[in-house]
Amino acid sequence: MSSATIASPKPAKTFGVLAEFKSPADVYHAAEKVRDAGYTKWDVHSPFPIHGIERAMGIGDSKLGWIAFFCAMTGAFGGFGLQLWIHKFAYPLLIGGKPMVAYPAYIPVTFEPGILFTAFGSILGMLALNGLPRFYHALFRSENFKKATDDGFFISIEARDPKFTVESARELLASIGGTHIEVLED
Amino acid sequence: MSTMIPHRDDDPTKRPVLVESSDFHEVTEIIAGPTETKLNSTWILLLGLSASFMALMAGLFGYLFWEGTGVWGVNMPVAWGFAIVNFIWWIGIGHAGTLISAILFLFRQKWRTGINRFSEAMTIFAVMCAGVFPAFHVGRVWIVYYIFPLPNQMGAWPNTRSPLFWDVFAISTYFTVSLLFWYMGLIPDLATMRDRAKGVRKFVLSIFSLGWRGAARHWQNYERAYLILAAISTPLVLSVHSIVSFDFATSKIPGWHTTIFPPYFVAGAVFSGFALVSTMLIVAREIFGFKKVVRMHHIENMNKFMLLTGTLVGYAYAMEIFIAWYSGNMYERYAFWNRALGEFWWAYWAMITCNVISPQFFWFKKIRRNLVWTFILTIFINIGMWFERFVIVITLHADFIPSSWGYYRPTWVDWWTYIGTFGMFFTFFLLFLKFLPQLAIAEVKGVMPEASPHHHHDTSKHGGH
């Protein structure tokens, strides 16, 4: 593992250990054991979301709802405010004697920007929380990892985890049924 | 692998099997495979044909631009003509995609995964086709940006209390949100294709898949984003055709000024949308061999939707006539008498035949599960829904004073522009069919019983937790 395969000026740093599992059920139970072993900087990789895996991994709820809510409010208040500003201050246009602040008629253009901002907020927020786009990642060095988007299930334990040593991580992953165990360089 | 009789989460005697495969890799092969083959000559021929029609459309818009609105058949009583008929028809087509991706998702209808990508793509392309019509119908297309609330040299702002302005917001929001939702769904599938690709193809797919690596911490945020988008798209899709119907309903024209319009337009939109999705899907699953993923069950469910929404539309037609009579208003009564028995009687009865009578065949299970019948009936529905919009718009030809009555005759430019938008739709659709995964790979895998973390352990009846 310490014998770097590519020539680099600095000695290669270890990214972590990667192991493959056979099925969603296997990786689910393995995740429970990695969680119980006290690791924090690790992840499960699968071609589709595995139902309930966040509980097996012991990770908290997604914070995306708050971002989306904030964006929804910004869009809705912005839309309403824009209309109010247009009719009250910028360009008061009297049509058929209708009131300027005809708030029921403001509803569609309050609703639609609210939706639009929420959509942008939840997708960009999702990418930001996930640290994407990120085109380089140590995991992509593994040829076997290509299966993670097809039919492979993986657990990676990262070197930045305080409990991490190559030996202990490798041992743990082997003991819980991991195969094709690889040590990856960053 | 447990291939023959796997432990299904759902009792197969009660719930139909959604995916006729128990191997994740096979699903990847079925869906990603067609994007990796060489271009075949039929596809190139079809693309060429569609692109020529799209070019014809562009040419005819150029001609309109050069010559003026006189080249269209619109006149003074019938100021809305083909442009608005086609606009509403196309925007209605788009509604099935969002309904499938959002509403059926919230109702946990797992069968939707077989058809959602496909119909979302149709939504986006249909809204594009719809959008060109009002843009040119405004007359001076070079200042079409006046419809947006942008600062300008005149210090003027649009009247935001007008339904035409609401329409601008509804349609542009709908298009943007549909595109974002569709792209987000594509990210994991593009990553799947990236990991199978080499060279330039890999480079391009790497960029668009944003470095997706299927991490559970990522999936968690991703699923939450999906849920939020589904939750906001549900009222959005209902709002879009409601707002389109406000263009009519807030006017004082007899036959338009009715409160039934918003739900009636939404039901009609879903009806036509499912019809076109079904038409295209029947062809695509034959050509690309998706029969293991898009099963008879999917086709039957869509037919049930058409039966429901078609019957709702029929109810709306009947209620319109009843209210016209019950209101005691002579103009209202005349509008409906004129629709059914006036100069455009043929359009009205074409609409009734195609929209009210044809879906009633779907009461029979044999017909719901028969591809030939389904195909023919969906074509009828597509035509019928176009006639519905024609009937509504053409109501303009005879309103209050007989001295201002007129007749509407579309010109050759009207017809060929409409036909040209099909070229635009199919050009984009063929490109999608060839270069992107037509079905949602990750989502299809997710509904397979093998995807459950309790698959090998739970032999009892209860499904998951």
Image: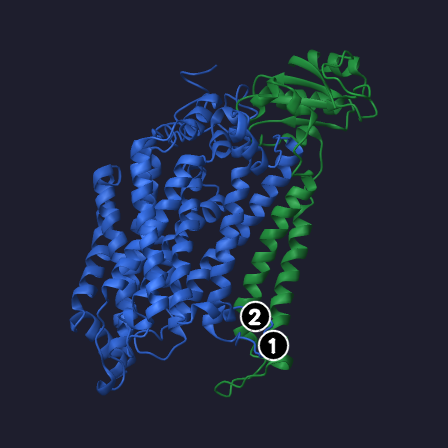
Chain colours: A green, B blue
Is residue B309 visible in the rendered structure shown here?
Answer: no
Decide if residue A98 is on the left or right side of residue A16: left
Identify the chain of the residue marked 1, using the numbered disc in the image.
A
Decide if residue B447 is on the left or right side of residue A145: left
Q: Nearer the viewer, residue B119 or B329?
A: B119
Mark 2 crowdedness (10 Å alpha carbons): few <14, some 14-19, many ≥20: some
Q: Is residue A36 above or below residue B129?
A: above
Q: Nearer the viewer, residue B451 or B461?
A: B451
Q: Are marks 1 and 2 in contact (CB under 8 Å)?
A: yes
Residue occupying image coordinates x 18% and y 63%: B349
Residue occupying image coordinates x 17% and y 68%: B345
Q: Which residue is mark 2?
A: B149
Question: In the displayed image of the protein, which residue is found farthest to the front?
Answer: B66
Q: Nearer the viewer, residue A105 or B125?
A: B125
Q: Locate residue B382, reporting x and y percent.
A: 27, 53
Q: Which mark is residue A39?
A: none
Identify the chain of the residue marked 2, using the numbered disc in the image.
B
Q: Which residue is mark 1?
A: A86
Q: Quadrant of residue B293?
A: top left
Q: Locate residue A171, reporting x and y percent.
A: 74, 12
- The CA distance from mark 1 to mark 2 is 9 Å
